[in-house]
Image (cartoon, rainbow, N blue to C red):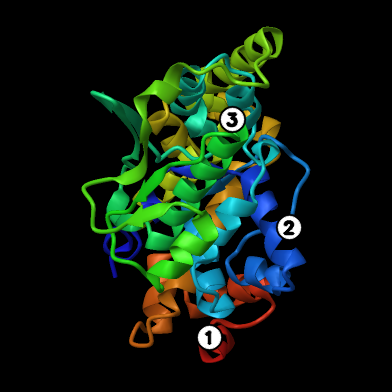
Amino acid sequence: MDVSQTKPWLTLPASVARPYINALYSLLKQAGFPVGQWLADSGVAAQTTDSDERLSLYHALSLWQRVECDAQTPLLGIQLGQALQPRDFPILGQAALSADTLRAAIEQLREFEPLIWDIGLCHLEVTGQTAKLMLNPRHSTLLPAGIIELAISGWLQIGRKLLPEHQHITVSFTHQPTAEEKLYKQYLHASVTFEQPFNGLTFPASWLDLPLPARDEHLQSLLQQQGRRLLANYHRDLNLPNEVRARICQRLLEGPVGPADTARQLGLSTRSLRRKLAARHTSWRTLYEEVRLDLAMLWLREPEAPLADIGLLLQFADQSAFNHAFRRWTGETPGQYRRRI
């Protein structure tokens, strides 16, 4: 069993802003879905008030897969994106609203998008009288169509807040429709095309220099300072727990791994790593246990994977030690968990 072959995003430090996840959580809960159970089954803690917390991409996608599977709601990503508000996009939402023009707002999107999720890569292309805002995510093969639809739908929703009187936008997706095409148009109130060369929005280039009704130079300056401060120390501060988690996962199958190994990979001293993780309300040991649990739950879904092999791959001394740890993590034995799922 090779973790990089099974779930590539486990070894990536990519992450999603927790306030964004919380906004989606609230919307789903309001719709009557059992979100608490979905969170627990995906290894995601309940809502937190820590506005700087980052949820690993692995946990975010595991949660999304569970939501799509159980909800059985057509175009759930589209619907959620249309229900989001600028406040649900930390810094980015208000920075876009307070920009002088649409062009400046798109520049805020390009600069601060990593504060929402750090695998997106937006690009503005202007050809003659046509402008295209395109989403070119890194590791695009890892992302289900529903996530792409959520992102583009969210862009469209913010765009309508920026220029409420300008609505003639075409939405493009590279994938085939996952529901009836009329549903896309019904939810998005826009022309929608599929199997296109890019995911994104197409609109008149003349809109780019239109003044925005909520522009605020002072607020814009404050948000830019705050956002750039967060981005400056992103890998060694804001997203450090996910950087550590990814490196633990990469090394775990090779043999025993310790905090000194991880610190060396990150160019930090062990003491500095410990201090920085404490500032993010976690520890190396906590992240190590989280990675082992993630891998255990993942491999237990493979019916042909022997329990003894899973325990050994996770660096447990024997099957008994693995059973004891898994029961401590989840309240049930590995065998009970496998039978339940």
State the image quarter where residue 19 is shown: top right
Q: Where residue 26 is drawn, which disc sits there?
A: 2
Horizontal and vertical percent for residue 194?
28, 58
Cα distance between the residues tagged 1 and 3: 45 Å
> Can the viewer see residue 12?
no
* Residue corresponding to mark 3: 162
Eye-nearest disc, 2 or 3:
3
Earlier residue among tags 1 and 3: 3
Judging depth in this view, the residue of 92 and 156 nearest the camera is 156
Q: Are marks 2 and 3 in contact (CB under 8 Å)?
A: no
Q: Is residue 341 above or below residue 41?
A: below
Mark 1 = which residue? 341
Q: Position of residue 268 (x, y in %)?
A: 47, 24
- Three-letter code for the amino acid on which mark 2 is drawn: Ser
Residue at 46% from the left image edge and 23% from the top image edge: 111
Which disc, if any, is residue 263?
Answer: none
Helix, strand or loop for disc 3: helix
Q: Quadrant of the N terminus?
A: bottom left
Q: Nearer the viewer, mark 2 or mark 1?
A: 2
The count of marks equals 3
Nearer to me, 224 or 307: 224
Image point 63% across, 45% down: which residue? 20
Up-down: is 40 above or below 47? below
Which residue is located at x 39 percent, y 53 percent?
A: 191
The mark that comes first in sequence, 2 or 3, is 2
Secondary structure, mark 1, is loop
The foreground one among 320 and 298 is 298
Left-right relation of 45 to 206: right
